Image (cartoon, rainbow, N blue to C red):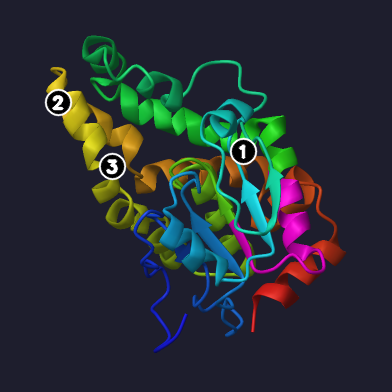
């Protein structure tokens, strides 16, 4: 990227890769800043056009981390950016069905409307965010995520799920919290998804309306809400006391890795 340094959370304009941004630029408690050009977050890479694929290869990525389930990956495999690819199934231990399974039934607006009406969509998402803290598979995945960031020759690194908003959102938020970014900046980065992703999801809303559904019932599961992230943070703090406790006791990261993360990601 060239030109003036962008504001933290600014969208990187790659047409077929919405919700792409650099995690850098945020100032942390000790006065340092999160480095630009180290960590990127995005949606899945399956729909990259050829010109956008060529543009992404210019980022010089060394690692791509995919938080999707095996079924999600098999249905829409990422395009090859020339980087090492690591699949980390955050939801492998989920026993029930989540928002993605429900939205697969877009041709049944009555069923979706019944499942998401009267605040049920919002509560479904709160449950999904609690799973990001509670599921053993989530802890294993995020342990590996941070371990890879700390590894030699792993950066620049891009991480994503399907829409880059929930699993990816927690990965970004927990990274920024750990590095010492103020809460308001953590929420700012998280909520940028509504600006950067929702326009790209317009066809989903239109498709649902075309088969007789009320597109507004989809909004709780296709957007992000500060309450969702707060749900995960509250559970993390009740369970582990702090973000440092979560990193050490929840994810099992040792002090050497934690210090390496700070050294590699802050300047």
Q: Residues within 10 Å of mark 3 (few under 14, many from 20)?
A: some
Find numbered disc 3 in the image and state the secondary structure of the residue it sits on. Answer: helix
Name the image quarter holding residue 115.
Answer: top left
Q: What number is the disc on residue 123?
A: none
From the viewer's perspective, is the residue at label 3 or at label 1 nearer?
3
Dividing the picture into quadrants, the one containing residue 211 is: top left
Report if residue 66 lies within the magenta region: no
Q: Which mark is residue 133?
A: 1
Instruction: Locate residue 73, reporting x and y percent.
Output: 58, 34
Determine which residue is flagged by label 2: 209
Which residue in the structure is indicated by mark 3? Answer: 201
Give the residue displayed 43% in from the left and 61% down from the top: 52
Note whether 26 is above or below 234 in the view shown. Answer: below
Question: Which segment is the magenta one?
Answer: 142-158
| Secondary structure state at the residue bearing disc 2 | helix
- The residue carrying pointer 1 sits among few (fewer than 14), some (14 to 19) or many (20 or more) residues within 10 Å by Cα, namely many
Separation of marks 3 and 2 at Cα, in angstroms: 13 Å
């Amino acid at each position: 990227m060239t030109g003036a340094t962008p504001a933290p959370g600014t969208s990187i304009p790659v047409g077929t890769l919405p919700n792409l941004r650099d995690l850098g630029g945020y100032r942390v408690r000790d006065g340092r800043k999160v480095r630009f050009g180290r960590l990127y977050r995005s949606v899945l890479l399956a729909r990259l056009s050829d010109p956008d694929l060529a543009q992404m290869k210019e980022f010089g990525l060394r690692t791509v981390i995919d938080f999707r389930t095996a079924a999600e990956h098999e249905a829409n495999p990422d395009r090859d950016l020339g980087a090492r690819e690591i699949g980390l199934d955050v939801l492998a231990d989920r026993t029930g069905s989540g928002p993605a399974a429900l939205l697969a039934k877009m041709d049944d607006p009555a069923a979706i409307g019944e499942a998401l009406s009267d605040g049920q969509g919002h509560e479904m998402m709160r449950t999904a965010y609690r799973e990001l803290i509670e599921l053993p598979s989530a802890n294993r995945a995020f342990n590996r995520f941070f371990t890879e960031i700390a590894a030699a020759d792993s950066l620049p690194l891009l991480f994503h799920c399907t829409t880059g908003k929930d699993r990816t959102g927690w990965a970004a938020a927990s990274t920024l919290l750990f590095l010492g970014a103020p809460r308001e900046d953590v929420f700012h980065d998280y909520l940028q998804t509504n600006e950067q992703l929702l326009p790209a999801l317009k066809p989903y809303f239109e498709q649902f309306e075309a088969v007789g559904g009320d597109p507004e019932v989809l909004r709780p599961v296709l957007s992000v809400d500060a309450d969702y992230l707060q749900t995960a943070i509250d559970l993390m703090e009740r369970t582990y006391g702090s973000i440092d406790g979560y990193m050490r006791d929840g994810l099992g990261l040792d002090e050497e890795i934690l210090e390496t993360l700070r050294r590699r990601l802050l300047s």
